[in-house]
Amino acid sequence: MKGNMRFRRLGGSYQLMIETAEDLQNVLELNVAHWAVTSIKINSMICDSAFLETLDSGKNGRIRADEVQAALRWLLSYYKDVSDIVAGADHLTLSKLNPENPAARLIQESVRVAQRNLNLPDSDTITMNELNDHANIISNALQNGDGVIPPDPVESLDPEAAACIRDIMKRVGSHPDVSGVPGVSQEDLDTYESLAKTYLAWIDRKEQDARTLFPFGDHTASFYAAFQTVEEAVDAFFRSCETLNYTAAGEAKLQTVVHTFDPLNAASVDAFLDQSVIAEVNRECVLRLDQRVNPVWRDRLTAFFQAQEQCGLDGKSLSLAEWIALRRNLAPYGAWIASKNTSIFDDAELDCIRAWMNSGVCGRIRELMKADVAVAKNLDGCGEARKLLLYQKDMMEFLNNFVCMHKLFENEAKSMIQVGILVMDGRQFTLCTLVHNIAEHKAIAVRSNICVMYLDIATEGGSAVKSMKVAVAVTSGHMRNLFIGKSGIFYTRDGSVWDAKVIDFIQQPVSIGEALCAPFLKFGEFMQKQADKFFSTKSKSYETNISNVVDKTASAPPGQIVPVPAPAAAPAAAPAGNASNPMMLMGGGIGIAAIGSAFAFIAKSLSGMSFWTVFSILMGILLIFGGPMILSSMLKLFRRNLAVFLEANGYALNRQMRMSIKMGRIFTF
């Protein structure tokens, strides 16, 4: 242990003083056995919840000493100048970070990116509010780390690229970036470029091999469309004709399959026509419009012959040889149409798309995407910067509530342990802690010998009422005016005022004066109870007699006087053995005479004594009967243990902390 460590005696034990930059290093060197606290529940502290949750690396709702050590090492590694940690500054100063730490350099770069995106001047500092402005930090669509590029921010940099991005969004689709602005991703760009290049190559074949692809010139497309509508049916017709010619030449009767149908049944007619060929089969293998044509195919066949006539061919008939030649001529066009990769460019200005593909605009868009993705690490670094600033702002105060408890012994409830200040009965109570389960808290807190009030405090918060339970230590003064149901006001650390009401107690001695007066107070309470009991009985007896008189008067004849009976005497004791009434009267007289003699003897004895002698005798009697009570109260008072009171709240403390009379005045005054 270094000799420059400074300690302060608090609650009967020495605790490390943490005030300077050197003290922060001492925290890491001091054995945990000398820390004030080794573990604490997150929900028992009044502090920035984000800071506490970040400290809780185990995510179990508790902060342990090893987690504090790891967090402090991490924090100190980022700084070459820790003065902002000591001061608990609420802004991050970039020049005070350690340039030899790559992670610290990344935070510096990240803050620069954040400042640029927030349109802030190039400053050496940034605040937590600015770092928390995540929406605006990522609002710069070209530098938000997602790789999605919207067109509008590109307009001023590269109008051609912006126009290309808009066309990609129109034909391929778009994706929102992290700020919600639609743009194109790397995948969108790759898909568009691949489709466009293939489509342009497909279009180029039209110019390069026009005579082969378009045997009928401008009519080729319409003729091929009509050809496709009857292609399968015409193939089936000529196959049937060839099959017919395949039969024996001298055969007098054709061997054909006869299909039947019910002319009154539409379904039967449709089924018959679907099974029939396009036209009447003949041995000449010629398809004519003037022969019998299947009604289902008549319109399509007519349109086909009209298209054929427009191409300079016969518009009335078609032989098998002509059909074979026609198929052969249209095959290249059909293959070319089938090789079309997409239709998204059918309405596009191909010259514009060709210019984009040749000018390298897609490459320039990719560079924008790479630059955008490159700042992703910087935006991640903003998260580290927020964590660093959280630690910088609250670490020093936290250490003074965990490694040592100096903050607890300052007035005005400045400790993270104290939830606020209670004002009640003309006093301020500052040792007030959050309680989540009163029964569990009482089971432990009763061992602290500290008088504890449990309060329900509430205030209006917006449209709802906020409330919480608080344990308040009563450490000086008295308990005479404190009782369940008593009300007061409570000031939380943020200055809010809450209504407070006592709902439970742990009754313990509060001060020496109260401990000394305890027997007298108990005796006074006993005498008051007995007097109340006696007068209550007598009063009830008189009320009963008067009620009886009133009832008799009301029922008596007019003019008759109803006597008021004397109060009922106490019932005589049952006779013992064969004792007679005269013997009882004689015994009672002897008893009264004995009491009178006793009082006379006491008066005669006291007449010869001084006042102080009488006072001493009375005090002796009180000490005999009240001494054990005073001794017990004094022992509890001097054994008050602040550590146990805190342990009831889930703290794991290393040392017992005796609460002295002087210390008690710190928390209640």
Image (cartoon, helix red, strand yellow):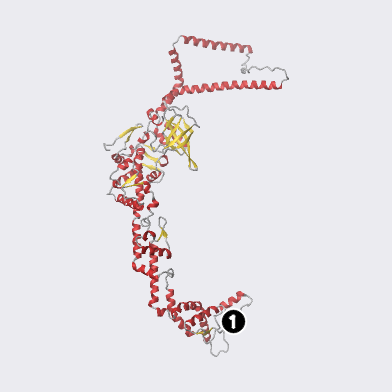
Q: Residue at 59% across / 81% down in the picture?
A: 258
Residue extending farthest to the right is: 557
Quadrant in which the C terminus appears? top left
Along the line of sight, the residue nearer the viewer: 264 or 64: 264
**Residue 116 percent across, percent down from the top left:** 34, 53
Q: Is residue 66 visible?
A: no
Look at the picture and state if 94 lies above or below 447: below
Along the line of sight, the residue nearer the viewer: 125 or 491: 125
Look at the picture and state if 440 lies above or below 619: below
**Residue 262 percent across, percent down from the top left:** 63, 77
Residue behind mark 1: 258
Q: Quadrant of residue 391?
A: top left
Along the line of sight, the residue nearer the viewer: 278 or 490: 490
**Residue type highlighted by circle 1:** Val
Q: Give the left or right position of residue 120, taking residue 238 as reference.
A: left
Look at the picture and state if 54 lies above or below 639: below
Along the line of sight, the residue nearer the viewer: 521 or 82: 82
Q: How many marks?
A: 1
Q: Residue at 34% across / 48% down in the picture?
A: 385
**Residue 407 percent across, percent down from the top left:** 36, 36
Q: Give the left or right position of residue 235, taking residue 262 as reference.
A: left
Q: Give the left or right position of residue 539, taking residue 38 as reference.
A: right
